[in-house]
Amino acid sequence: MTGSHDLTQLFSGMAPVLDHATYVFATLPDRTVPPGLTPRMIMQEAEGTTLILTQEAATAAGLPFEFPCRMITLTVHSALDAVGFLARITTRLASLGMGVNPVAGFYHDHLFVPLDRADDAMTALAEMVREARG
């Protein structure tokens, strides 16, 4: 199933969903994920294994972490090679002085935004949907 490349369709069709959990980023230099831990994302990097997981899970596992954030899922099936979709979103959020860590999944894109800016991000995304719908 191929996602959409059409930016108008992607923006007018997205319905961002804000996850209730607080997420954090942690790293495992030895690359060993503790038993029973189910991260939202695992990324192998040269320096170690990066995890995105709930703050609750990181604390319970005794993992040091950074960047408490909220996850917004852009519930529209974007193609993995869609040009400009995330660029426009991250540019809009940057114009509000907001950093964002985007992650592409097979079906959806996910945005990890600062904990205290989640509502601002949701407002900006809703504006983008309204603009695309005319």
Image: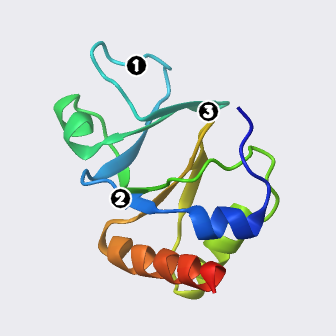
Q: Residues at badges 1 and 2 in contact (C-beta under 8 Å)?
A: no
Amino acid carrying label 1: it is Val
Residue behind mark 1:
33
> Quadrant location of the C terminus?
bottom right
Residue behind mark 2:
70
> Quadrant location of the N terminus?
top right
Going 59% across and 39% down the picture, which residue do you hit? Answer: 105
Q: Nearer the viewer, mark 1 or mark 2?
A: 2
Residue 1 in view (yes/no): yes
Which mark sits nearer the N-terminus, 3 or 1? 1
Going 61% across and 70% down the picture, which residue do you hit? Answer: 12
Up/down of 83 relative to 35, above or below:
below
Q: Nearer the viewer, residue 65 or 1?
A: 1
Residue 49 in view (yes/no): no
Residue behind mark 3:
47
Amino acid carrying label 3: it is Glu
Would residue 78 be found to the left or right of residue 119 on screen?
A: right
Q: SS class of the residue under badge 2?
A: strand
Up/down of 15 relative to 128, above or below:
above
Would residue 49 be found to the left or right of residue 57 on screen?
A: right
Q: Residues at badges 3 and 2 in contact (C-beta under 8 Å)?
A: no
Q: Quadrant of residue 101?
A: bottom right
Q: Nearer the viewer, residue 132 or 42?
A: 132
Which mark sits nearer the N-terminus, 3 or 2? 3
Where's residue 14, x and y in %?
55, 62
